Image (tube, helix red, strand yellow):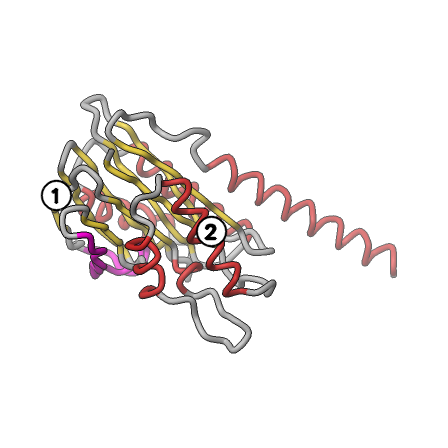
Amino acid sequence: SSDLFKAENERKSSELEAAKDLQNRLLPKEHPVLDHLDIATYLRTSTEVGGDYYDFFQQADGSLYAICGDATGHGTPSGMLVSITKAGIIGLPQMPPNQMLSALNTVVKKVDLGILRMSLNIAYLKGNQLTLSSAGMPPYFIYRAENQITEEIMLSGVPLGSFNKVAYDELTTTFNKGDILAIISDGLAEAPNAKGELFDYAQIQSIITENSHMNSKTLIDELMSQADVWLDGAHNPDDITIVIIKHN
């Protein structure tokens, strides 16, 4: 029976490898190169293959869709959900983020993966304008260079696949020189310390404000080094995904 046990373990680990490989393939190979935007990303999976996802869709007119998502569950099913979401986005014409979310919700609901849900943020950047929409994701953070504060922007919206017909909220705002957009999955805010206290959104907000002079990549490094001090060697139970876009 030890042979059976070994075979079962090998099967499980090769399944896990396949799921990890799928997750990596679904992420963009490189960042869009735009003169006015400094873009950096980070994804750390927890031991299981999670369902975190980020993506960029650059348009012919120089505008950009930035995506950050979090599928419920782990392993192959969440990978399938990310695949469906990504394929759905690729198939959509250029349209406002909240309409994209409604269309994607219909797709995910029709495919019907049972209790699986996809939380998703879609941000659309065009020149000095930023349009945000959300399907059950944590708040966006926007650092404003003009008054040197970081705003927390929470948009209501249920995760994709929850109900049949869903309309999503949308917010359009300015995005000027020196401003920073941060899109973060809940794995960072919910990182627990030894006492079980969470890293939390307020802490993320103040780190962004204090380090707003940094470029996107260095700001991510700073967020993660502070999160790792907080975790103090403990395993983070969830994936952590960070997308930072700074307006040069």
Q: Is the N terminus in the top left, top right, bottom left or bottom right quadrant?
A: bottom right
Start-end of magenta stretch:
148-166
Q: Nearer the viewer, residue 142 or 218?
A: 218
Residue at the spot 13% in from the left edge and 39% down from the top edge: 129
Q: Which residue is mark 2?
A: 51
Determine whether 59 is above or below 214 in the image. Answer: above
Q: Nearer the viewer, residue 170 or 223?
A: 223
Q: Position of residue 218 (x, y in %)?
A: 41, 43
Q: Amino acid at mark 2?
A: Gly
Determine whether 216 is above or below 202 in the image. Answer: above
Q: CA distance from mark 1 to mark 2?
A: 31 Å
Residue at the spot 52% in from the left edge and 38% down from the top edge: 24
Q: Position of residue 34 (x, y in %)?
A: 28, 26
Q: Nearer the viewer, residue 212 or 15?
A: 212
Q: Is residue 2 left or right of residue 92?
A: right
- Which disc is residue 213 wearing? none
Task: Name the mark nearer the viewer: 1 or 2.
Answer: 1
| Residue 211 painted magenta | no
Q: Amino acid at mark 1?
A: Thr
| Residue 161 painted magenta | yes
- Which disc is residue 174 wearing? 1
**Circle 2: element type:** loop
The residue lying furthest to the top in this view is 60
Find out whether the residues at labels 1 and 2 contact each other: C-beta distance under 8 Å: no
